[in-house]
């Protein structure tokens, strides 16, 4: 099922159709876009688009799914953020701000729902070999920026997310876990 997480009405309709089948127990918020520019030259639309996808998308998807998790007294919310939220990055004030706000939301929401058996964590990847990073970093850039001298693999991030979604992660909540080859 595909829908635009920035469109609250479309998101609600899509989620209601899914919730008719029962509570969603594991949510991975993985929406994000880049619209990079140095801050003095950033256009308001660039700021708004990035905030809409990462931060308002988080709200539009997570808020309606939280109460059903509370009713079942179990759930996992995993927010995919970025090393940019931890370290900052030139030309990405909007992206760093949006993902950094997700760190704060992760910690606050984890406090609200911990007693209900719901964990809320964030995974902050560094340079991962995906379409989003393709063409953004040369091999020399990666060797200079990443102590492990290589980009991460999507499977490595997926393994961490899978662990956080499992019963084995029952006592881990409110954490921002970096997976970045030693960048930060």
Image (cartoon, grey):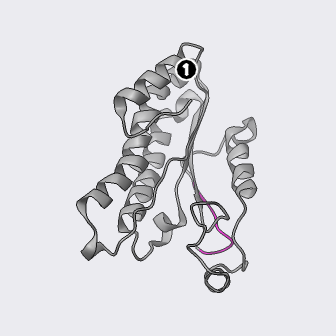
Point out residue 13 in the picture as x, y percentages from the top left corner. Answer: 43, 22
Whether 105 is drawn above or below 75: the answer is below
Tell whether position 59 is magenta: no
In the drawing, does residue 86 fall left or right of residue 133?
left
Whether 62 is drawn above or below 163: the answer is above
Q: Residue at x 63, y 86 (%)?
A: 144
Point out residue 106 in the picture as x, y percentages from the top left corner. Answer: 48, 47
- Residue marked by disc 1: 18
Point out residue 103 in the picture as x, y percentages from the top left corner. Answer: 46, 54
Q: Is residue 67 visible?
A: no
Q: Nearer the viewer, residue 166 or 110?
A: 166
Q: In the image, which residues are magenta? A: 176-183
Whether 108 is drawn above or below 61: the answer is below
Q: Residue at x 75, y 50 (%)?
A: 159
Whether 148 is drawn above or below 2: the answer is below
Residue 93 lies in what quarter of the image? bottom left
């Amino acid at each position: 099922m595909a829908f635009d997480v920035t469109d609250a009405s479309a998101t609600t309709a899509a989620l209601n159709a899914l919730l008719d089948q029962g509570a969603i127990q594991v949510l991975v918020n993985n929406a994000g876009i880049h619209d990079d520019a140095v801050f003095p030259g950033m256009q308001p639309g660039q700021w708004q688009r990035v905030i809409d996808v990462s931060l308002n998308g988080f709200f539009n998807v997570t808020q309606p799914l939280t109460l059903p998790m509370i009713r079942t007294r179990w759930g996992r919310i995993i927010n995919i953020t970025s090393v940019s939220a931890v370290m900052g990055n030139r030309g990405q004030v909007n992206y760093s701000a949006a993902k950094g706000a997700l760190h704060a939301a992760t910690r606050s929401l984890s406090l609200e729902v911990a007693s209900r058996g719901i964990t809320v964590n964030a995974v902050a990847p560094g340079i991962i070999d995906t379409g989003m990073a393709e063409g953004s970093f040369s091999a020399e850039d990666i060797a200079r920026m990443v102590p492990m001298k290589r980009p991460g693999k999507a499977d490595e991030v997926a393994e961490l997310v899978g662990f956080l979604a499992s019963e084995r992660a029952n006592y881990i909540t409110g954490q921002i876990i970096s997976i970045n080859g030693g960048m930060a």
